[in-house]
Image (cartoon, grey):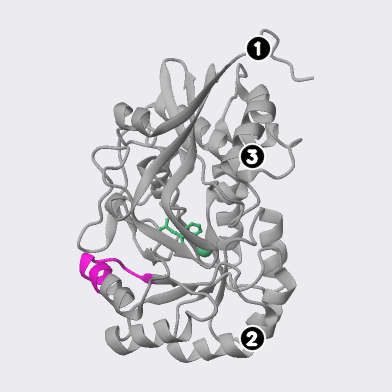
Amino acid sequence: MKIERLELALLELPLVHFFETSFGRIDKKHFVLVTLYGGGFTAYGECVAEQDPYYSAETNETVWHIVTDFIAPRVVGIEFEHPRDVFPALAAIRGHNMAKAAVEMAAWDLYARQRGEPLSQVLGGSRERIASGVSIGIQNSLEELAAKVRRELDAGYRRIKIKIKPGWDLAPVEMIRARFGAIPLMVDANAAYTLADAAHLAKLDAFDLMMIEQPLEYDDIADHAELQRRLTTPICLDESIKTVHLAEEALAAHACRIINIKPGRVGGFRESIRLHDLCAERNIPVWHGGMLESGIGRAANIHLSTLPNFSLPGDIAASKRYFEPDVIDPAIEVAPDGTIAVPREPGLGVSVVQNRLDRATLRRHTITARPVSVVS
Ligand code: OSB
Ligand code: MG
């Protein structure tokens, strides 16, 4: 498989509803889309970096820089036997997993399209449908939160996750339990607490949550281990699991009992599969995280979720919760039983609407092979 050309585009899509986490509120989604061309096929990789370095250190601008100056010269014009060889080819570049993942995931899509197989099959997955959960951002009031929870339960979603932060934690959980009973419920703090809050967080134990996601700092394994000793609620790590190696350290330290997999965070599909397999070996359930992706990235997440150890519903919901219209048509929908069908067409298996992409594009850059394909 030869990658003949790489295109970068910076897109802006309005969100149907603002999304607020402990690090802030956004009402538009800005992301970099990588398009690869090879053998007459076009493939996509949606980057999950954001405009601000709040979830992770990467931003759309660092992605643009790293892909243009360091990743493209190592992949464009190069022959790869298999997309699993792309991540190792980028080993000289430290970090920047979201930039690497966008290119690597597009390479898997290109490979799958060339073989005429759905991405899920190439990744080694076998499910035909995946279980869908929702992530509900911080709201302006408990009433608004209750209305959202009601709507998502009515739509069939299989678990509800709410974002929490100091000042918006016990009350929303208490309200949901009081009004909606024993629904599958979890919380995500996006690193908003410190170990000094351990006694406060332990009050959440009374609500029988499925898990608490990333309560403490994004690079703090030891404190999570200490916190887990003080909680009965399982800790799930998101931000902290930046590499498979860090996951091994976190599991060895008992810093979490569940892991959320986002391919962008760990450098793409190859590393996600390794992380998935590591967790399977250790009896650690995993679920697929979300980063408010457009239909392109959402489809990629669906395909990866077909692997067997994705045993809990992921943050992969219907397109219309985020974008109306999405950049793909038909949009991704959730059935009344809270599941999503895995696309069966080759590659990502969704149809990108070019004029919607064009309208959303703020900036574009094309990179073709250099005359000499050796990186000095
Ligand atoms: O922590 O899981 C997170 C969105 C942006 C950044 C981080 C996170 C999220 C979500 C949204 O929770 C999940 C979704 O795509 O619905
Ligand atoms: Mg999270």
Residue occupying image coordinates x 56% and y 67% = 190
* Gap between marks 2 and 3 measured at Cα: 35 Å
Measure the C-alpha gap from mark 1 to mark 2. 55 Å
Residue at 30 percent across and 42 percent down: it is 326
- Residue 159: give x, y in percent of width and height: 35, 70
Q: CA distance from mark 1 to mark 3?
A: 22 Å
Residue range (magenta) = 150-160
The residue labelled by disc 2 is 198
Of residues 18 and 232, the one nearer the viewer is 18
- Tell me which amino acid carries mark 2: Ala
Q: Which mark is residue 170?
A: none
Q: Please rate how many residues cluster around mark 1, counting C-alpha atoms within 10 Å: few if below 14, some from 14 to 19, many from 20.
A: few
Judge the density around disc 3: few (<14), some (14-19), many (≥20) Cα neighbours within 10 Å.
some
Camera-side residue of 65 and 79: 65
Q: Is mark 2 within 8 Å of ligand 2?
A: no
**Location of the C terminus (image quadrant):** top right
> What amino acid is at disc 1?
Arg
